[in-house]
Image: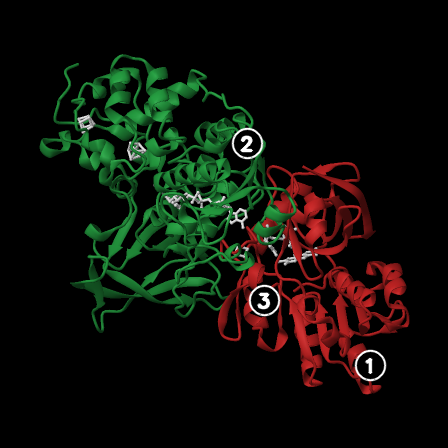
Amino acid sequence: MFKIREAVMLCENICKQVIEAPRIAKTCEPGQFVIVRADETAERVPLTISDYDRKEGTVTITTQIIGASSYKLSQFKSGEYIADITGPLGRPSEFVEEPIDEVRKRKYLFVGGGLGTAPVYPQVKWCKENNVDFDVVIGCKTKELLIMEKEYEEVAGEHYHLTTDDGSYKHKGMVTSVMEELIAAGNHYDVCVAIGPMIMMKFAAKTALDAGIHTIVSMNPIMVDGTGMCGACRLVVDGEVKFACVDGPEFDAAKVDFDGAMKRMALYKTEEGRAFLKAKEGDTHHGGCGNCN
Amino acid sequence: MAVDMLKKVPVREQDPAERARNFDEVCLGYNKEEAMMESERCLNCKNARCIEGCPVSINIPAFIQAVKEDDVKKAAGIIAESSALPAVCGRVCPQESQCEGRCIRGIKGEPVSIGKLERYVADTAREMGIKPEVKAEKKNKKVAVIGSGPSGLTCAGDLAKSGYDVTIFEALHKAGGVLVYGIPEFRLPKEKVVAPEVANVEALGVKIETDVVIGKSTTVDALLNDEGFDAVYIASGAGLPKFMNIPGEQALGVYSANEFLTRNNLMKAYRDDYDTPIARGKKVVVVGGGNVAMDAARTALRLGAEVHVVYRRSEAELPARVEEVHHAKEEGIIFDLLQNPVEILEDENGWVRGIRVIKMELGEPDESGRRSPVEIPGSEYEIECDTVIMSLGTSPNPLISSTTKGLDTNRRKCIVANEETGATSKEKVYAGGDAVTGAATVILAMGAGRAAAKGIDEYLSN
Ligand SMILES: Cc1cc2nc3c(=O)[nH]c(=O)nc-3n(C[C@H](O)[C@H](O)[C@H](O)COP(=O)(O)OP(=O)(O)OC[C@H]3O[C@@H](n4cnc5c(N)ncnc54)[C@H](O)[C@@H]3O)c2cc1C
Ligand SMILES: Cc1cc2nc3c(=O)[nH]c(=O)nc-3n(C[C@H](O)[C@H](O)[C@H](O)COP(=O)(O)OP(=O)(O)OC[C@H]3O[C@@H](n4cnc5c(N)ncnc54)[C@H](O)[C@@H]3O)c2cc1C
Ligand code: SF4
Ligand code: SF4
Ligand code: FES
């Protein structure tokens, strides 16, 4: 059992939970994820570590409620216990394991869309702490769905660029339009990291790749064990089958087959949708942020 | 009732038509009367050949004598000298090629039903509340065991009995390894059989820490250098699934047997009260012919599908246990033998709509001694189906070997370890079970755990 030290709703459909998990907090790095099982009958749900505190022995997960399992998890409040949290899983972001002198020679462009705002955060924080140059572009549908504004202001200051699809706050437009503006204004980036809904990653990656920027995306296929045992998370990267849980979840965007990955993500959608509706009996489920699919 | 000395006392089983629709155990086991009747068939041989057939050398005639005397406690004690998981082995050992394969009774008739007797003893002992004894003086030395499958549990249990402070680290949320995530409920009940065996190991003082992935959460080197362990036993199994690399394998509805079985067994997808979903196909093709393939096929059947097993050799070469094949057939699994998939076909939404197979014939024997299948040109045809389960074998996961300095592996990614002691190329580090041998059997994994416990004890005693 693992204690939830803090649980808050960041917006209508995204919740943040800080969990006491000293083993994970000790060794995790930006880019890695955990698998959480809320209670005995729950699924194993993969979630990116969106913050960690080694001293406190805690890791933070940020979950978007899109179906039955994420909904169940979101119902666990401060002081309660979840059954399991395993990790850190997957590989850390590339820069974590590269020589820091090399990394410092580069400028990074971080792009987070919707829920992707959360998993990008530890990477941005790491860069800040390690004096690596960067800009961040965060986009969301509308003002009400914006998360982690304060955190980003603190860690990125003037390098934080915010946009809403509907223009209800700050800049109006998709993340790609901000990326284009930044590039057009003469900013040079060596690496772009884009995390968010698959469709957003596909277009953000295209924008960055077209500008000749090495681009990394974080894939989130269906997972069961997260240790390379089941093969559910397999995707084709550069013509080769990879297991996202051990070979990823971050991959070179130029080599990812986005359309194939999106197709595999469709698995279970209908069945699960039904289970969720049953659980909520009558309540109209207006699925997530609307960013996905 | 008179005992036919040439035949095993038949074991009661759930009716095939009935059990094809539920996940309850297929084999109901012997009751006391049946067990005592069957025990009469044992000749109590002086040179008991059955013992040579058992990888952990259980004193089979001795425990069967105790059954004859209706002394289950004594029988359980005799088995416990050699095996830590008798209720499991009695159920899943390939007895026909091990203990029973050598039984003298088998020359003229059927061998003594050693597995069923072992199961009877273990189940009865459990029901009577007979527990393994804890005697050891504390040794003040810590051993870490990685993986809670049969190999890890056995090694941990033995070391605890010798007084070591043992912690098992398990990647999944539940202890038991393949016994919980792979082998289905209808062959090996989880709450009734596996959980008590795990509890017995814990009762010896072994701590089990689940949700710890060695190589990720921490490393072997960190266990030794920072967490104060004096030795480590790696029993991480051979869990990495293989795929065929044929076109269409990324289609929706294609699973590895591991995924399919894990969803069903570990995550209990077959039960309404658990959240994990599983595809209940209408027509399922399972590719492969081992125990794992049989388990996947019989699971899919119970979830309501028509199931075909596609295997590239003939029935004689099926690597699965004879009993499993027999049960599968009784339940209505269709065997499409001497055929091999060449492509998985997708519909316009990316879902499986069929599989293209080519017919095979048997040619010359290969290095395994089995006649190797050869394609018959022009014999391709399509089998319509909505789900494909790939059950082509597994290999050890490199997660540990790639994160442990100085740990040698062979070209099959198996950890290299001394068979007698479990010692690896790295000091203080031992290994055994499927992680060393590649996918094998429960009893061999247990035997390796036992050998390594001895090896570790000797090393730490010097
Ligand atoms: C590496 C990784 C990191 C992720 N990080 C985050 C994160 O930080 N925050 C966040 O909100 N989401 C994250 N996700 C996605 C998250 O795991 C899914 O949104 C979640 O599993 C959906 O479950 P659901 O039942 O609520 O939704 P539904 O869409 O209703 O799920 C339907 C069914 O699909 C399956 N399913 C869908 N996606 C996944 C998945 N990725 N893994 C396993 N099963 C799945 C489940 O079986 C589920 O029952 C991540 C996924 C991966 C692989
Ligand atoms: C479906 C199926 C059916 C089978 N049927 C039979 C049968 O009928 N008869 C028979 O004799 N054998 C059968 N086998 C084979 C038998 O189950 C295995 O040979 C045996 O379980 C191997 O035991 P083990 O302890 O070496 O490994 P496993 O049982 O595989 O246990 C390894 C454990 O280590 C854990 N682990 C792995 N990596 C890590 C890590 N990095 N950190 C922490 N923990 C880790 C795993 O999660 C797992 O729990 C079957 C196997 C399968 C898959
Ligand atoms: S452990 Fe297996 S091989 Fe040995 S006697 Fe029991 S069933 Fe036979
Ligand atoms: S070989 Fe057969 S008959 Fe002889 S002791 Fe063993 S089980 Fe009994
Ligand atoms: S989640 Fe099972 S192999 Fe990646």
Instruction: Tell me the quarter of the image containing the N terminus of chain B.
Output: top left
Check disc 1 and give the amino acid type.
Answer: Leu
Outermost residue, left side: B108
Nearer the observer, A291 or B434 = B434
Give me the residue at 45% from left, 32% from top: B158
Task: State the hue of chain B.
Answer: green
- Are discs 2 and 3 located on one and the same chain? no
Label 2: which residue?
B206
Q: Nearer the viewer, mark 1 or mark 2?
A: 2
Chain shaded red = A
Q: Nearer the viewer, mark 3 or mark 1?
A: 1
Nearer the observer, B349 or A183 = A183
Label 1: which residue?
A182
Q: Check the residue under mark 1 and report the chain it is in.
A: A
Label 3: which residue?
A262
Give me the residue at 51% from left, 30% from top: B160
Is the residue marked by circle 2 packed among few (<14), some (14-19), or many (20+) residues within 10 Å? many
Q: Is residue B184 visible?
A: no
| Residue A91: mark | none
- Are discs 3 and 1 located on one and the same chain? yes
Q: Check the residue under mark 2 and report the chain it is in.
A: B
The spot of residue B85 in percent (x, y) is: 40, 31
The spot of residue B339 in percent (x, y) is: 26, 61
Check disc 2 and give the amino acid type.
Answer: Val
Mark 3–mark 1 distance (CA, rounded to whole Å): 28 Å
Q: Nearer the viewer, mark 2 or mark 3?
A: 2
Do residues under tags 3 and 1 come within 8 Å of each other at their CB atoms? no
Report which quarter residue B288 is drawn in: bottom left
Mark 2–mark 3 distance (CA, rounded to whole Å): 45 Å
